[in-house]
Image: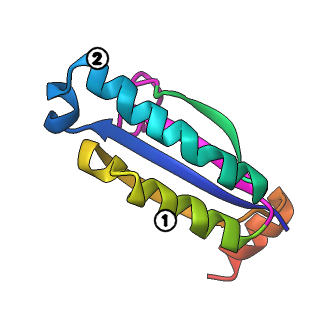
Amino acid sequence: MAHYLAELYSPKPLWLALDQAARRQFFEAIGSGMGALSALGVEAIALGETNAATLHAAGHKFFAIWRAPDAAAIDALVSGIAASGWHDYFETINAAGSGVNLSDHLGQLAAL
């Protein structure tokens, strides 16, 4: 069963203070770690800027949605993100779990 990670994040002042060379260096380090995560089956489904005009919009500026074959791969992704220093630069909220279809999800909600 596929597992997912949805991230919402916004830059912190420390990120905004970095020059372009330091930002490129940080992203190069992130890119070098992606090979190991890809080997685990982790894939980025969508990444982008949030739409502030959306009804009940998130307070964060960016989003990322990831898919992986199991919880262990999602755990590796979350750990890798933390180890990269990401949270020094971005305020982040994570939501992770296995994916179900709409009917099963409605059943989850009804069971509360």
Between circles 1 and 2, the one closer to the viewer is 2
- Please say whether residue 60 is one of the residues in the magenta stretch: yes
Which callout, 1 or 2, points at the residue further toward the start of the chain?
2
State the image coordinates of residue 33 (x, y, percent, origin top left).
Answer: 56, 48
> Residue at 19% across / 27% down in the picture?
18
51 to 46, vertically: above or below: above
Left or right: residue 102 compared with residue 81: right
Q: How crowded is mark 2: few (under 14 residues within 10 Å), some or many (20 or more)?
A: few
**Which residue sits furthest bottom?**
111
Left or right: residue 112 compared with residue 41: left
Left or right: residue 27 compared with residue 95: left
Q: Tell me the quarter of the picture where residue 16 sits.
A: top left
* Applied colour scheme: rainbow
* Residue sitting nearer the eye, 105 or 82: 82
24 to 99, vertically: above or below: above
State the image coordinates of residue 83 (x, y, percent, origin top left).
Answer: 40, 59
* Residue sitting nearer the eye, 30 or 95: 30
Identified by mark 1, the residue type is Ser
> Residue at 46% across / 54% down in the picture?
81
> Residue at 67% across / 54% down in the picture?
36
Residue bearing mark 1:
79
Identified by mark 2, the residue type is Gln
State the image coordinates of residue 13 (x, y, percent, origin top left).
Answer: 14, 35
Q: Give the range drawn in magenta.
A: 51-69
Report the predominant secondary structure element of the magenta stretch. loop
Quadrant location of the N terminus in the rendered image: bottom right
Q: Tell me the quarter of the picture where residue 40 sits.
A: bottom right
Question: Is disc 1 in contact with disc 2, using a CB cutoff of under 8 Å?
Answer: no
| Tag of residue 20 | 2
Identify the secondary structure beneath mark 2. helix
